[in-house]
Amino acid sequence: MTKTAIITGANKGIGLAVAEKLIQNNYQVLLACRSTKKGLMAEKYLGPSSKFLELDLADPESINLFVEKINADYSNLDILYNNAGLIYRNFELTTEGYESMMAVNYFGSYRLSLMLLENLIRNSGRIVQISSLSMYLARKLVLDNIHYEKSFSPSSRYNLTNLYRSMFAVELENRLINLPVSVSVAHPGITKSRQSRPHEVKRIKKSFYTYFSTNIATGVAPIIKAIEDTDVQLNRVYAPKIFGFYGKPATMKHNKIVYNKELRESLWSYTAKELNLDL
């Protein structure tokens, strides 16, 4: 029986590569992408087992319309893979007045997960939350003035949003303990994600990370394991085995802040109030 998975940010990189793998494993994959042009290009590249649907995680109206479409046309979801995110973006505010990386990377995952929860519960589905090695660089919970440029830097904000993604996933699982839905967290290490495009890439601009990044298959493997593992280990992160960089998929500890129940609850309360959305 064909399963159905939503992948946000599936038009290139890790999202597209995971979509390819899931299609090989007999999934129907819904490509939730902001760009219509790029989303349709990915749909054409992946073939009839994929379907592009527009979704802009920075726009609450776009999220609402997306959820309405999913619930109307796809009543039994198996997987929501929260993959989309902004990386090292300069300071910018969304139409709601939220800093863009916080809005897309964290608030977007929170909104989409909670709004699709009933659909996932009906089919004993799973929410898979992407994170990053950068979460280990975040040293504390920051909830004050996070939408002001004065306290902002692209790297520290990216680190923080990935910490928050992981904290959210663990807290969500704890709050759903008696419901037929599971949650997992995965990160791909540092991979050559630009290898995965729906079109030929003739030249890839090199960066510092190019020299120790791994092939994209290494990054995809722990995510597939987080999707398909029958015994989810939420107290750990699915990641490449060796230092989170290399090797076969395994699990590793979260940032220690993730295990702090009081801090997770503080983050949840702040987010629920900010977005007027709770379980």
Image (spheres, rainbow, N blue to C red):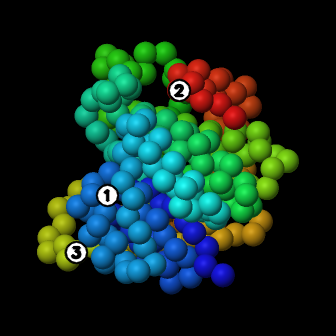
Q: The residue under label 1 is which amino acid type?
A: Tyr
**Mark 2 touches mark 3? (CB < 8 Å):** no
Label number found at residue 275 = 2
**Residue 230 point in image, percent of width and height:** 75, 69
Please state the horizontal and vertical placement of residue 49, each as a whole percent of the image.
45, 78
Helix or strand or loop: what does disc 3 sit on?
A: loop
What's the distance in space between the residues labelled 2 and 3, CA to CA?
37 Å
Q: In the rendering, at what x and y percent does residue 244 appear?
A: 53, 60
Q: Residue at x 85, y 47 (%)?
A: 178
Dot placed on the residue nearer the N-terminal end, 2 or 3: 3
In the rendered image, the vertical position of residue 75 relative to residue 112, given as above or below = below
Classify 10 Å Cα crowding around label 1: few (below 14), some (14-19), many (20 and above). few
The residues tagged by marks 2 and 1 sit, at their Cα atoms, a distance apart of 35 Å
Residue 272 vertical position relative to residue 58 in the rendered view, above or below: above
Kind of residue sitting beneath label 2: Leu
Label 2 sits on a secondary structure element that is helix
For residue 209, which numbered disc appears in the image? 1
Of residues 52 and 220, the one drawn nearer to the viewer in this rendering: 52
* Mark closer to the chain start, 2 or 1: 1
Q: Please give the residue where the numbered disc 3 appears in the rendered image.
A: 199
The relative height of residue 276 versus residue 39 in the rendered view (above or below) is above
Q: Nearer the viewer, residue 122 or 91?
A: 122
Q: Are marks 2 and 1 in contact (CB under 8 Å)?
A: no
Query: Amino acid type of disc 3?
Result: His
Identify the residue at horizontal 81%, vertical 50% (top origin): 179
Gap between marks 1 and 3 measured at Cα? 23 Å
The nearer-to-camera label among 2 and 1 is 2
Out of 40 and 159, give the one closest to the viewer.
40
Left or right of 252 on screen, residue 39: left
Q: Residue pushed farthest left?
A: 202
